[in-house]
Image (cartoon, helix red, strand yellow):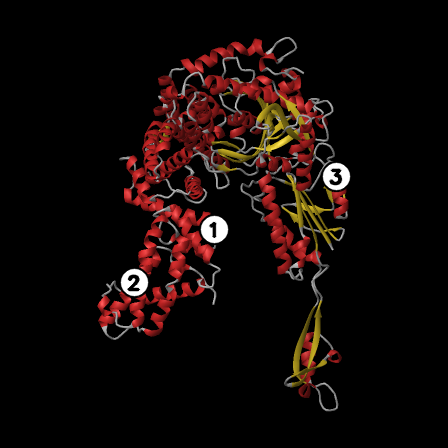
Amino acid sequence: MEFLLEIITEEMPSVHVKGALMQLENRLAEGLIANKLVDGKDSFGKIRTYGTCRRLILHGGFVEKQQDKQETIVGPPRSVAFTEDGSATPAAIGFAKSQGVNVGDLEIIQTEKGDYVGINKIEAGKPTPDILEQILPNIIGTLSFPKMMRWGDSSFRFSRPIKSILCLFDRKSLHFSVNGVPAKNFTTGHKIYSPKKLKVETFAEYRALLKQNGVVIDPEERRTQILKQAEKKLARLEAKLHPDNQLLEKLTYDVEHPYVFLGCFPQEYLNLPLEVLSTAMREGQRLFSVLKGKKQLPYFLGVADAYKDPKFLIRKGNERVLKARMEDAKFFWEQDVISSLKEKSKKLDQIIFQERLGSYQDKTDRLKKIVAYIADRLELQAEKNAATGAAELCKVDLMTDMVREFPSLQGKMGGLYAKEEGYAILVWKAIYEHYQPVSLDDSSPSSMTGAILSIADKLDTIVGATGVGIEVSGSKDPFGIRRNAHGVCKIIQEKKLSFSFPRLLDKVINTMKDRLVREKEDVKYYVLDFFKSRLQHIFESQGYRYDLVKASLAPGLDNVYHSYLRLEALDSLKDSPQFGPMIKIAKRVNNILRNQSQYKVNEELLLEKQERELHTTFSIIRDNILPMIAIGDFAKVQRMIFRMRSSINDFFDHVLVMADDKRLRRNRLALLQEISRLLSQIADYSLVVIEG
Amino acid sequence: MSLQNLIMSLQRFWADQGCYLAQPYDVEVGAGTMTPDTFFRVLDDRDWKVAYVQPSRRPTDGRFGENPHRVQKHFQYQVIIKPAPSDIQKMYIDSLTSLGIDLQEHDLRFDEDDWESPTIGAWGVGWQVLLDGLEITQFTYFQQAGGIDLSPVPVEITYGLERLEMFLEEKDNIFDLNWSDDVTYRELRVREEKEFSEYNFNQADVQLLHSSFQKNHREAQRLVDKGLLLPAYDMCLKCSHFFNLLDSRGAISVTERVKMISQIRVVVNRIAQKFTSQEVSA
């Protein structure tokens, strides 16, 4: 039977809507299962959600009621309950009374132990509406949002105030309320065009009626409408939207009735960089910029929550506001280019990066050293000068008017001003890209100079903040340490940068001189540990198995890129037939070595054939793979290690490790210890979970 | 419609909704939220309905009267209702309609924009209201003020009067607005903008401002101890204004900024706490 729920609220942020719909769907499904209203997995497919910034909508098809429950209650044996002539004994009368039935209702129940009297009780299943009325207030009332508010005088919290609830089961409204708002059988139309009550009985009717009254409930439908209308408006210009998925997503939820309008702005503003224009359009007014090829056109696209714009009032209003913003931007650009970046950089010492870590001039001095160090380690002599040159100027744009007005343009503006001044591409690109990636979804710098500068900047912040005692805890992360660490890992992984991570940390720590409050070693190990936990998070979010991630990170973070290669190698072999047996035997080696002191192998004491053979195989393999480990060819390394398995097996089958002779015992343990040491440079196999 | 007609229309509208019409407060503030008719009145659990014009000073926004949109002093129309009526959004929409705006011909949007004022320990959840892309109002459900959780929850509606008037007159330049039929915004304000911009950016005596900040801060603390909360709060408002002036003189580093804001907040929070505990005992 059909179920329909609509919660109308004041305007919620788009991320809130999406999160709440997912929670609603999951928790209602859980509630149905818990109350035995779902027969198998099928019914899950019957829930669908829709939504706008003002509506959370859920539509489903559920069974009418719980299945009836049949229960057999067994009483005394037939021979005790009835005399031979068939009359009831006090035992039968007592049992009947205790069950609230007449003696005549008792039935004979055949069991393995013979005939008994008893009754078959049928408990009627609860009707679905009763159950829904019971569970819905709690499901709705405990939805969680990234930021919640109270209203009125209750302590109830939600994304935005709840205005009304529509809830129907089989055409009839259910009876419950949430924070004093009762469920009813009507919805309301578009806030401006049709703010009236609309009574409905079915979902089809609901959807159609809302459409007539200015509301398209399906986000996909609205998105398609926006894109189609945009395409139509742009066809004549042979242009297309500057792609911006985040903005499209937001607008899809922000409007209930999308109307796309095309506006224009004076040609003169086209002299501004595309980045500035699109930021001015996006922030504040939520407008798309319009491109022809890669060229910005003097047009923009807006999405209004409206039917149409016959008098062009919406378009003209937006044009007026945008013109003012562009006038501002132009003013900022003109002010900013009056003096050169070099000239401006003289004032870097006047802005504080962090009280103990000094000014941005201090940070700049450190960045130059760190960048030069990384370039040397990676043998990038061509990039070294460009990267240090970029480091020198990369923070200057913090003092420009443009970045003060549009903070999201930091870095980019510096790059654009450097380009304007005629700096080489390796320099201005590095400045432009050095905040990237700003999240795990953002792309890494395209230039190697940008990559190096970005790593240097982020590590300076992480090490500095950690070293003066600022730590990440829960939602508190004022210096974006987590985000910065993600950025560093992402760049290293994508650019395949292989270098000693602890030594780079030493370098960064040393550039801090006496600014740090904590001990140098402390800071280093804290940061290493922090990166390990971040890598674990990153790898798992990339879909790698939890235990493989742990096993690959166990050898330590000597080289961040190698941790990734270790994991990749382990992951690529996890389905091979040798994998399970090899893990098992590695675990066996580790188990036997537990709580043993360290010993040394004496070749003369290798008496048995199998232990000599294992020693020889091991030595050859070790000599072969050590150089491979050094260059990070872990796929090859793992495959070679697998070849040792039969020798270890033979060893365990024929040689008694815990021999009575102390010298033999210690020698055999020593051999296993050497093997274990080698394995631990590749992965901690004992952390890998295998079945059986 | 002239600016003064706009003000009169809003006064009429909100008086009809039962608001008491207050007069502007006479100490410099950066926003209407900071005035006592808002700050103190949201702290207790009594019903409260007020509406008033409040001049707001933001020294760093000065542009010597040369920018068509930015000024270092503008006028807000502030509405506070506690508890927020359940149909407050509709009431607000009606207020726009009462100005003669046919919303079916425009695009009215409530765009997520949560508000926060660290200086007075206040934050709220709400929207910037955009009319054809122009931000005309800040609409906020207060959650906290003076570091205290507010219950019942008040709603604050702050209209930017010049913005709204620019929309109504379809003007591109703030100075072209008509204050009345005969007097333009330019005639009234352009000299003030020029002189104050020069003062805010170039002339204000940094030493004097620093010491005034500290003296007023000390005075605020002394007055809180004496239980004179309204005068103590005035001192905090003065501190806030001195801080804003120092900021526009470029005389505050990032760390100083954090420190000075927290200096004010600590006193404001004490004022709020004392105020609510007095309320309870009274």
Chain for disc number 3: A
Badge 2: few (under 14), some or many (20 or more) residues near its Cα, within 10 Å? Answer: many
Left or right: A22 in relation to A679: right
Q: Nearer the viewer, mark 1 or mark 2?
A: 2
Residue type at numbered disc 2: Gln
Q: Nearer the viewer, residue A296 or A334?
A: A296
In 3D space, how far apart are the residues under numbered discs 3 and 2 (Cα atoms)? Answer: 73 Å
The image position of residue B236, as x and y in percent, is 44, 26
Marked residue nearer the N-terminal end (3 or 2): 3
> Which residue position holds label 1?
A540
Give the number of the disc on residue A211: 3
User: Element at badge 2?
Assistant: helix
Residue B131 placed where, x, y %? Answer: 64, 26
Cα–Cα gap, marks 3 and 1: 43 Å
- Mark 3, Cα crowd under 10 Å, few <14 / some 14-19 / many 20+, is some
Residue at the image point whose x is 66% and y is 41% from the top: A219
Callout 3 secondary element: helix
> Sequence-wise, which precedes: disc 1 or disc 2?
1
Give how far across and how far down residue A357 sits, in percent.
33, 33
Are the residues tagged 1 and 2 within 8 Å (C-beta)? no
Check disc 2 and report the residue beneath it.
A673
Q: Is residue A667 toward the left or the right of residue A207 in the image?
A: left
Are labels 1 and 2 on one chain?
yes
Q: Position of residue B205 (x, y in %)?
A: 38, 15
